[in-house]
Amino acid sequence: MKYRKLGKTEKSISSIGLGCMRLPTKDNLQMSQNIDEIETTKMIEYAIDNGINYFDTAYPYHGGKSEVVIGKILNNFKRNEFYLATKSPVWFINSEGDFTRLLEEQLTKLKFDYIDFYLLHSLDSNRWNNIVKKYNVLSELEDAKQKGLVKHIGFSFHDSFDVFKSIIDEYDKWEFCQVQYNYMDIENQAGKKGVDYAFAKDLGVIIMEPLRGGRLANPPENVKAIINSYKPLRTPQEWAMRWLWSQKEISTVLTGSSNLEQLKQNIDFVNNAIDFEFSNEDLEFIEKVKKAYLDRIKIDCTKCNYCLPCPNGVNIPRNFELYNDVFIYENPIPPRMTYQRFMPDIEKASNCIQCEECESKCPQKLEISKLLFSVDEELSKK
């Protein structure tokens, strides 16, 4: 196993961290509460035996059961053999004191006296301004650190680079951050600019969704043909992981392995690599792969946001992005799940009233109202 420093914490963590959002389940339903503890134990034992020392869970994972199971298993190991990371569910904070109450609940579930790396979960502009700042969450977070309940503090993030930069600039005690980043998300969310900015501020950078929820591991045939034609011959997931590891700004990459075989494969990627350097030819190859994905786009939305704000609250670019993902990756399940479960109703394509105000503002001259009907039809399917 190879190790890197996690920013100003100076902790040495494994190049792979085990993400505990997609653990093995007895019913084979992804992220269900019915976690297979026997298989999960095998994974964690194998991970520790092979040098992984960073384990990432969160309050809502597996319907609240991930923390319970991970805590139960990790309690069988020496406390200095691993680092435990989990996250505060800030969306449940409605008043001062809620943060501390939730942290105490998590410590009870985990059966640990402290958490090594504690994150404010999934920050965006709304949660930062209307929850974290409004209810003085940072003061309670600092108090928890002073009491030794958490050792290092950070945040995970889903919003634009400008919001990411503001969150870092407005609080000087962050030690690390966690962002969605892969070769298809260079300009999405915090993106490459965010990774570089955090690194420049001496924050550890933890990567989630390195395979975009597994989609980069199972490419469409046209993309697979490009990957298979390049030498050295590597699997799609190994190329995606090595692309991340080649960047010195990244501290660790979380693998959301759902079985032992996936975990072994990712560990082999690290152990078999002499180094993680990328040649110019390798970078050109990744750009070629990315273009092959993007050529599959159905709606040519550039996300310029000129169509916003929608008078009825529809998040037009986000709807188009989810719709395009269905065709880019030939896997409709993740975008449909995001649309149906996690997208606010007011932002959905179904909330369009066909006023067409957006269409006169669109530089691409898209028939937005008509397209939103198709988006909702596709993303609402079961």
Image: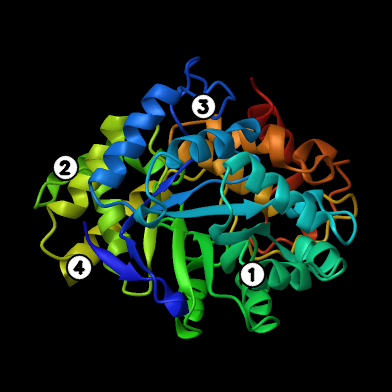
Is 216 situated above or below 218? Answer: below
* Disc 4: which residue: 278
* Disc 3: which residue: 30
Front residue of 300/325: it is 325
Q: Are marks 1 and 2 in contact (CB under 8 Å)?
A: no
In the image, is 249 to the left or to the right of 231?
right
User: Residue 285 at what x, y percent from top left?
Assistant: 22, 59
In the image, is 106 to the left or to the right of 357?
left
Q: Earlier in the sequence, mark 4 or mark 2?
A: 2
At mark 3, the secondary structure is loop
Cα–Cα span, label 3 and label 2:
29 Å
Q: Nearer the viewer, mark 4 or mark 1?
A: 1
Cα–Cα span, label 4 and label 1:
39 Å
Asked where in the image residue 360 lies, by quadrant, the reply is: bottom right
Cα–Cα span, label 4 and label 3:
34 Å
Q: Earlier in the sequence, mark 4 or mark 1?
A: 1
> Which part of the image, by quadrant, shows the C terminus?
top right
As shown in the figure, which amino acid type bears the numbered disc 3?
Gln
Q: Nearer the viewer, mark 4 or mark 2?
A: 4
As shown in the figure, which amino acid type bears the numbered disc 2?
Asn
The residue shown at (85%, 42%) is 354
Front residue of 265/150: it is 150
* Disc 2: which residue: 228
In the image, is 362 to the left or to the right of 206?
right
Cα–Cα span, label 1 and label 2:
49 Å
Q: Nearer the viewer, mark 3 or mark 1?
A: 1
Front residue of 180/283: it is 180
User: Residue 138 at what x, y percent from top left?
Assistant: 74, 71
Q: Is residue 219 visible in the rendered structure shown here?
A: no
* Disc 1: which residue: 145
